[in-house]
Image (cartoon, helix red, strand yellow):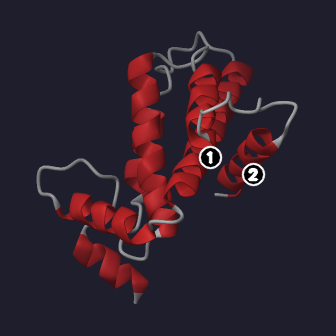
Amino acid sequence: MNTTIRYAAAAALMLASPALAASPAPGERREEAAWKWLDQAMAPTLNQDQRAKLIWAAYNNAAGSLCNEVTVDDAKLGAALAALLPPDDGKMKPEQNHHLEGSLLMHLGAATGIFAAENGENLTEFCAEAATMRDDPNGNSLFLPREDDEAEKK
């Protein structure tokens, strides 16, 4: 997890850096500018479907970080991220694979931070929505089931 924290911190610094994150255009909300930047940053390595899956993982990650009501299942999160990596066919150099893994974690950290910024002032609604998603039998959240979540917190 220390690697995840490092990449999340690097992403937060990049979002905060005036040299790397342009000021939003007049009338554009900061969150919209951040999402736009992130989409552009992910485009060279992830296709649109993969970017959507990473954003979904980040939503779950943010809710798990901000809400006492839900806990992210690390195995599910890891599997969701691993599915974004190309199959290990021996053609990719280890350095390339390491770079791609680092990029995924950085993008996950950036998206998690954007979700935190967007929902920091309405945690009650955000966390209630996350709990509803966790309890949906047809859902695909990355949260531990309610009973496992409660047992883990004891």
At which x and y percent is residue 70? 36, 69
* Residue drawn at 82 percent across, 30 percent down: 20
At which x and y percent is residue 80? 40, 40
Q: Amino acid at mark 2?
A: Ala
Image vertical order of residue 154 relative to residue 98, above or below = below
Q: Is residue 140 left or right of residue 2?
A: left
Q: Tell me the quadrant of the picture where the C terminus can be found.
A: bottom left
* Residue drawn at 23 percent across, 77 percent down: 147
Name the foreground residue: 46 vs 99: 46
Disc 2: which residue:
9
Name the foreground residue: 79 vs 139: 139
On the image, which quarter does residue 5 sit in? bottom right
Per the image, label 1 sits on a secondary structure element best described as helix
Disc 1: which residue:
109
Mark 1 crowd level (few <14, some 14–19, many ≥20, 10 Å Cα)? many
Whole-Å distance between the Cαs marked 1 and 2?
A: 7 Å
* Residue drawn at 11 percent across, 57 percent down: 137
Name the foreground residue: 154 vs 14: 14
Image vertical order of residue 146 relative to residue 45, above or below = below
Mark 2 crowd level (few <14, some 14–19, many ≥20, 10 Å Cα)? some
Q: Amino acid at mark 1?
A: Gly
Per the image, label 2 sits on a secondary structure element best described as helix
* Residue drawn at 69 percent across, 19 percent down: 96
Note whether residue 50 is visible.
Answer: yes
At which x and y percent is residue 92? 62, 14
